[in-house]
Every structure is written in structure tokens, then in C-alpha cells.
Image (cartoon, helix red, strand yellow):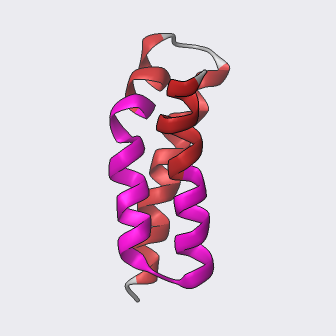
């Protein structure tokens, strides 16, 4: 349970803070922080509800790229 909190929930909170304050570096940090565990969870058991974490990784990256403009 602690691993889920540290590797998935904490980057989500960091991403929320980054989106509300419009800081691109926080969004990139949330993406990089959740990338290893998010890829593992989304690819380890196909098909399942955990595949949505792969979609969230894509959303982190897209939102960070959109903040540049």
C-alpha cells in the first residue's frame, strides 16, 4: 500500500500542484516519477483496469508539453 501511495498518488498530487501553478517542471517531474511504476502496472496485466495508468502517463506528458505554449 505504501508503494502505491509513493509511486502513484504522490506524483498525481505533484501533477495537480503543477497544473494549478502552471509550472512545467513539476509536470515533467510527475511524469518522470510515475513512469517506471506506471509502465509496469499498465503493461504487466493486459487487459485490466490498471492499463489506465498508461493513459495517465500520456496525459502527464501532453499537459507538460501544452504548458510550454
Q: Percent position (x, y) of residue 42? A: 48, 25
- On screen, residue 61 above or below 65: above
Q: Nearer the viewer, residue 53 or 25?
A: 25
- On screen, residue 8 above or below 50: below
Residue at the location (46% across, 50% down)? 58
Residue at the location (61% across, 21% down)? 1
- Quarter-wise, where is residue 28 in the image? bottom left
Q: Is residue 56 rendered to the left or right of residue 32?
A: right
Image quarter in which the C terminus is found: bottom left
- Work out which residue is located at the far right of the displayed protein and give it: 49
- Quarter-wise, where is residue 67 in the image? bottom left
Q: Nearer the viewer, residue 16 or 63?
A: 16
Residue at the location (52% across, 60% down)? 14
- Work out which residue is located at the far front of the displayed protein and give it: 2
Q: How many marks?
A: 0
Q: Is residue 26 magenta?
A: yes
Q: Is residue 69 magenta?
A: no
Residue at the location (45% across, 64% down)? 62
- Work out which residue is located at the far top of the displayed protein and give it: 45
Which contiguous range is marked in magenta? 12-38
Q: Is residue 19 rendered to the left or right of residue 31?
A: right
- On screen, residue 57 above or below 25: above
Q: Percent position (x, y) of residue 65? A: 39, 73
Q: Main secondary structure of the magenta part?
A: helix
Amino acid at each position: 500500500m505504501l508503494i502505491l501511495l509513493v509511486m502513484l498518488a504522490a506524483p498525481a498530487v505533484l501533477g495537480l500542484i503543477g497544473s494549478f501553478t502552471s509550472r512545467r517542471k513539476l509536470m515533467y517531474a510527475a511524469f518522470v516519477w510515475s513512469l517506471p511504476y506506471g509502465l509496469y502496472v499498465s503493461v504487466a496485466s493486459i487487459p485490466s483496469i490498471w492499463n489506465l495508468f498508461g493513459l495517465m502517463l500520456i496525459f502527464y506528458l501532453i499537459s507538460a508539453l501544452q504548458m510550454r505554449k
